[in-house]
Amino acid sequence: MAQEAMFYQKLEANKVQCSLCEHRCKILSGKRGICRVRENREGILYSLNYRKLIAAHIDPIEKKPLFHFYPGSQSYSIAAMGCNFHCLHCQNWSISQVKGDAIAGREVSPDKVVQNALDSNCLSISYTYTEPTIYFETALEVARLAQEKGLKNVFVTNGYITSEALTYLAPYLDAASIDLKAMSDSFYRKVCGARLKPVLERIKEYYELGIWVEITTLIIPGYNDDEDELKKVARYIVDIDKDIPWHISAFYPTYQLTDAPPTPVSTLQKAYQIGKEAGLHYVYQGNVGQGENTDCPSCGKTIIQRSYFTTKNRLKDNKCPYCEEHIQGIGMSGTKS
């Protein structure tokens, strides 16, 4: 089911320019943009993945990863096919990268998505697995209805949305888990087929719009594990807000990036120290089964224990029970104790 897309301008000779993401593709009639799911049909841009879900699962919110947004809760997680990045190491390449013309997925109405989330006792809906920006029309419809029904909305994103699209969506978004893949434009161009600058600009904008932000960096040996680069990531986050959580995750060879080895735990530990020395209050290690607990930035005691998801939450009224330091986040007292 194709739907006329939002955020595009008509040009001469039936060409259009999409302004949904920072590629801002100029698309000839009969052609598609970089995402492969937005097609120009005689001067009208269509969203080809509209209401076509390729995945729907119930996940712990910690999987997004979001550690400071209602820890211990569950999130109804959906995706449609396609992506505006072409990451060589994409774990979900089979649903993010469109090969050929067909757009797989099952047509599901926004009402059904929201009802499924409510029936599953989920606190939020996450738009994840692929890049939610490129199924914007579907995400917007679901998010509006979800908000009406008391559910929270979460974007798990590469941050390549345009400012105009983000501003439009922001009233319905509660949190965002944003990938900051590197602080090198050459990395973004070579590995992802994109640029760094728009991502940096958009992360700040998410934050300034009042959306809860957590940042994830997947560390790939030989690609973005240089100590100076990791320091740049940490300083960039600190300059926005030292209370933004930074998730540093281990890489495992996959898809088209198999020349790099798995990330050593020692590299994650080094990045953790870099983050803490830069002044970040909350730094986490991912994909290695350790380093996921939340420690109070004031007294240093462990206040939330995690093993894949929240297993013990000692917070009371979002405060450390030992020193009463306020722990930044939303719903930090969580759903489990």
Image (cartoon, rainbow, N blue to C red):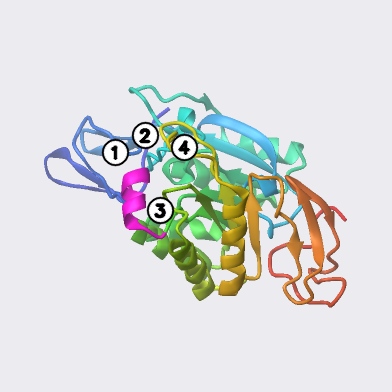
CB of mark 1 within 8 Å of CB of mark 2?
yes
Q: Which kind of residue does numbered mark 4 sit on?
A: Cys
| Viewer-side residue, 190 vs 45 | 190
Q: Residue at x 36, y 58 (%)?
A: 184
Q: Alpha carbon of mark 3 to alpha carbon of mark 1: how far? A: 14 Å
3D distance between C-alphas at marks 1 and 2: 7 Å
- The magenta stretch spans residue 120: no
The stretch of residues the image draws in magenta is 183-195
For disc 3, the marked residue is 161
State whether residue 193 is above or below residue 3.
below
Whole-number angstrom distance, CA of label 4 to CA of label 2: 18 Å
Identify which amino acid the numbered label 1 is placed on.
Gly
Q: Residue at x 85, y 67 (%)?
A: 316
Q: Point out which mark residue 33 bears.
A: 1
How many C-alpha atoms fall within 10 Å of the one at disc 3: few (<14), some, or many (≥20)? many
- From the image, tell me which residue sits under label 4: 90
Residue 232 visible: yes
Q: Main secondary structure of the magenta part?
A: helix
Kindly give the residue lying farthest to the left in the view shown: 13
Instruction: Specify the amino acid type for callout 2.
Output: Val
**Disc 3/disc 4 C-alpha distance (Å):** 19 Å
Is residue 186 covered in magenta? yes
**From what the image shows, is residue 220 above or below residue 116?**
below
Circle nearer the N terminus (4, 2): 2
Location of the N terminus (image quadrant) = top left
Could you tell me residue 114's position as x and y percent?
A: 65, 40
> What residue is disc 2 on?
37
Q: Where is 282 relative to 21, above or below?
A: below
Chain-order first, disc 2 or disc 3: 2
